[in-house]
Image: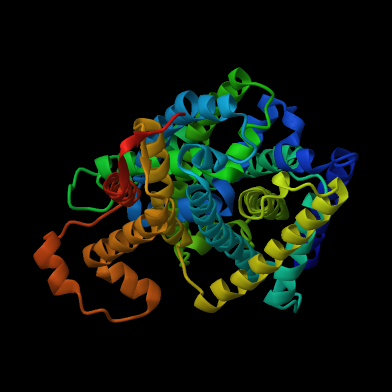
Amino acid sequence: MSPIILFSFVIGYFLILLTVAWFTSRGSDNESFFIGNKKSNWMLVAFGMIGTSLSGVTFVSVPGGVGSGNFFYFQIVLGYLLGYLVIAFVLLPLYYRLNVTSIYSYLEQRFGVEAHKVGASFFILSRVVGATARLYLVINILQIFILNKLGIPFVVTTFVILLMILLYTFEGGVKTIIYTDTLQTSGMLLGLVVCIFVIIKSLGTDFSGALSMLNDKGYTQIFNTDIKAGSFFMKHILGGMFIAIAMTGLDQEMMQKNISVKNLKDSQKNMMSFTAVLMVVNFLFLFLGGILYLYAQKMNIQAAPDDLFPTIALSDAFSGTIGVLFIIALISALFPSVDGAITSLTSCFCIDIININKTNDDESVKKNKRLKVHLAFAVLFFLLVLVFKAINDKLIIDFILKFAGITYGPLLGLFAFGILTKKTIKKEWIWTVCIFAPALVLGLDILSSPEWYEKKLHLTLGLNEISNTIFNGYKIGNELILINGLVTFLGLSIITNKSQKAST
């Protein structure tokens, strides 16, 4: 299909989003932007959160990873289920009881201002890098398969897409995103289902037949029983559980939407409904990955894992319909993960760093500050996407999970220490502990898997022999975040005030 036609669908899709934003942002104020006036419909929040959780990375990298990792990713999804139960019945009751706008306000109430700043800073660091990595992946696909053919430079593509997102989130914030995420999740799931149907049909079989073919190839293997492997099932399940707790339950972007629901009961219904649907959708993405590899083998198609889906969907072998659906589904996966990130980062910086809600400024002054912060984060996203373009990495989901394990570990340790103990800490040492813990764990991970870092950083570390001596072939996997959280927890135990207990 002509790239001009495909690009016109992208523009048309954005205009629909802009229209929705115009209707939903009328009469918005700072409370609308930050928490949607606590009037969000829980069903819309649950459905929209699916798109936010999956993103363009899931849409492209999870299917692409089936070729080398079978269905091992579903072990992580099983861990997510356990993590979401903790969020629904431990963290959400805490947030509603304290009536927070930013979840990191809990850390201030529990440990003081420094802990509040630490939690917010680690969230900002992790979300900025993770969201821009996801953004880069999708923009790069659009660039390769559409915009290069139109002679549009990557830098222009990035600028225009971020401008689009900025335009429809600038006023409404969470109030708008609840509705746009619902629309975008619908587009993504429609594209997923139709693409599966078309690929199965092209293989000359049905769903059960395709599943049988995948089983014969070994792609449907879910559990890895090799204890030394990074994808060993206990590592993935435990890692997935704590990734879910940290990247959803301790993440301002995801919780900002949950606490915008009017009461705890509805917020818990939202979380459990979201969990059930997410399990099914992730399985469908893995199934899609499997049949894409079957089709690629049948047609002798060679492509990098992250390029496999777009290469097949936009090939001449299919009608233009699947190409249009792929593009719509891809940008439907892109926008929820970026619009929510910029909005939550704006909220976090305004509330947790510059304390906009504690000043006596006029409401118009506060709004002006918030708009400037929102714009600043959009500019930062633009610059970091260009950095990822220069690095030009592949299978970016590995990087995102690794980076999350490093940066969310201190948050996991802080919240766990606050909830599970009554101890207070020496505030002047909190930054030291929360920087030392991820630095130590990063060093351990490099020693465990030097080849991963050599590949990603294009360096020769020469640590293979040391790694084999210390770890004997053991690879740290997604349990990285758990180790990080435990080290932070132990560090906080060392700096406690022995004679004092928290009053909350």
**Residue at position x 44%, y 29% in the image:** 503
Quarter occupied by the N terminus = bottom right
Q: Name the residue at the bottom extreme.
A: 460
Q: Is residue 167 left or right of residue 106?
A: right
Q: Is 211 or 182 nearer to us in this picture?
A: 182
Number of numbered callouts drawn? 0
Q: Is 440 or 364 nearer to us in this picture?
A: 364
Which x, y percent locates residue 18? 85, 49
Q: Is residue 402 above or below residue 171?
A: below
* Image color mode: rainbow
Q: Is residue 47 left or right of residue 18?
A: left
Q: Name the residue at the top extreme.
A: 265
Which x, y percent locates residue 389? 57, 74
Which x, y percent locates residue 328? 71, 51
Q: Is 320 or 503 nearer to us in this picture?
A: 503
Q: Is residue 313 left or right of residue 420?
A: right
Q: Is residue 206 above or below residue 467?
A: above
Which x, y percent locates residue 210? 44, 40
**Residue at position x 32%, y 39% in the image:** 237
Q: Is residue 50 above or below residue 136?
A: above
